[in-house]
Amino acid sequence: MKYLFFIISMMSLLPLSLSAAPAANDIDTLHPVARATPPGIKNSGIFLTLKNNSDTAHALVKAHAVVAGATELHTHIKEDGMMKMIPIDKIDIPANADTHLQPGGLHIMLINLKQDLKPGAEIELSLTFEDESTKTLVVPVKKVTPPKGPGHQKHSTM
Ligand SMILES: [Cu+2]
């Protein structure tokens, strides 16, 4: 009986210890890619999947890439029938769910690039979450085709 009580008290402690873990430990960064730029183009985007493995909702609040003069969090909104990009304060990553950053939707915006992003190159990206925990990753540069037609908007509306 004592043993059973011990297990029950351990189980009740579990949610506490989970929520105390840094957000960076709960989030996997999957399939990161930076969009290759033609010579002279100063802006680009980074796309990836943020996978939250915890029961706690998290948020990406900041991104920083050394190759860019500024790095912003962006989304697309529809205004007067046109898609346009706007900066946002944070990107929510709901508990036990994937948040997709992809062309036509949420993305990390690279502004004032200090160099051309050539396919095959790699750039360093650091991410800061709502509790100020951070994660640094290496992002391969690849050609990314823009979304074509309404069919490709499906995922970004989720
Ligand atoms: Cu943008």
Image (cartoon, rainbow, N blue to C red):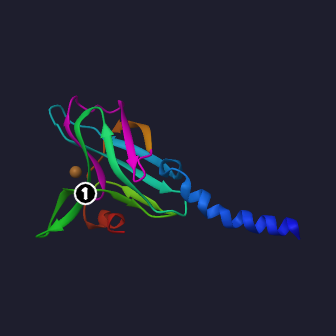
Instruction: Name the quarter where the C terminus is drawn.
Output: bottom left
Helix, strand or loop for disc 1: loop
Identified by mark 1, the residue type is: Ile
- Magenta span of residues: 105-133
Residue 69 is situated, as x and y percent measured from the top left of the image, at 21, 35
Confirm whether the magenta stretch covers residue 127. yes
The number of numbered badges drawn on the structure is 1
- The residue lying toward the viewer, choosing from 93 and 144, is 93
Quadrant for residue 43, please give it: top left
Residue at left 53%, top 52%?
26
Residue 74 is situated, as x and y percent measured from the top left of the image, at 25, 54
Residue 42 is situated, as x and y percent measured from the top left of the image, at 17, 37
Residue 144 is situated, as x and y percent measured from the top left of the image, at 30, 45
Quadrant for residue 9, please give it: bottom right
Instruction: Name the quarter where the N terminus is drawn.
Output: bottom right
Furthest-right residue in this view: 1
Residue at left 41%, top 47%?
132
Q: Is residue 32 above or below residue 97?
A: above
Q: In this view, does 127 lie to the left or right of 82?
A: right
Circle 1 sits on which residue?
88
Confirm whether the magenta stretch covers residue 45. no
**Does any atom of ligand 1 lie closer than 8 Å to the CB of label 1?**
no
Q: In this view, does 16 lie above or below 46?
A: below
Furthest-left residue in this view: 80
Q: In this view, does 97 lie to the left or right of 5?
A: left
Q: Residues within 10 Å of mark 1 (few under 14, many from 20)?
A: some
Quadrant for residue 77, please give it: bottom left
